[in-house]
Amino acid sequence: MKPVISHIAESALYVDDLDRAVTFYTGLFEWPVLLRDDRFAVLRITPQQVLLLFRRGASLEPATLPGGTVPAHDGNGQLHICFGISADELTCWEEILRAQGITVESRVRWPSNAASLYFRDPDQNAVELATPGVFE
């Protein structure tokens, strides 16, 4: 029997200015910073998931740690990430974004009646907030 994947534990974005990205994500979502150095920051989303913010180009070489080696990785361009929200909080999130001066680039109403808000982080990554049922 094949083992089951229970969840995505980490999501990663690559940014040009780590300080700016940490300020943006912690200011908007109020996620605590678990770990931080000049290469990356780890933000706690839920007890089972973190967002990794890597300074673009800072992980082009493998990272050797006491417990093993993390392979090299990097990302370029306008990447995309989606965070799930409650349907009852969609309007609240629109107000929060507006209050923080963040422009909603697009609103999508899916065939399932789920909704998504799209906006950009300071590195022009596409950030999506989606209500349940997008892929139903």
Image (cartoon, grey):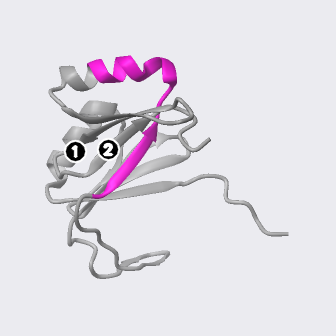
As drawn, 81 above or below 38: above
Residue at 21% from the left image edge and 39% from the top image edge: 24
Return the residue at label 1: 121
Quarter of the image with the C terminus is top right
Q: Secondary structure at mark 2?
A: strand
In depth, the one of 33 and 100 nearer the eye is: 100
Query: Gap between marks 1 and 2, in whole Å?
Result: 7 Å
Q: Secondary structure at mark 1?
A: loop
The answer to whether 25 appears left or right of 71 in the picture is: left
Residue extending farthest to the right is 1
In depth, the one of 95 and 33 nearer the eye is: 95
Q: Residue 9: x, y in percent?
A: 53, 54
Q: Residue 65: x, y in percent?
A: 41, 75
Residue at 57% from the left image edge and 44% from the top image edge: 135
Residue at 50% from the left image edge and 75% from the top image edge: 67
Q: Residue 95: x, y in percent?
A: 28, 18
Residue extending farthest to the front is 111
Residue range corresponding to the magenta coloring: 79-95
Return the residue at label 2: 127
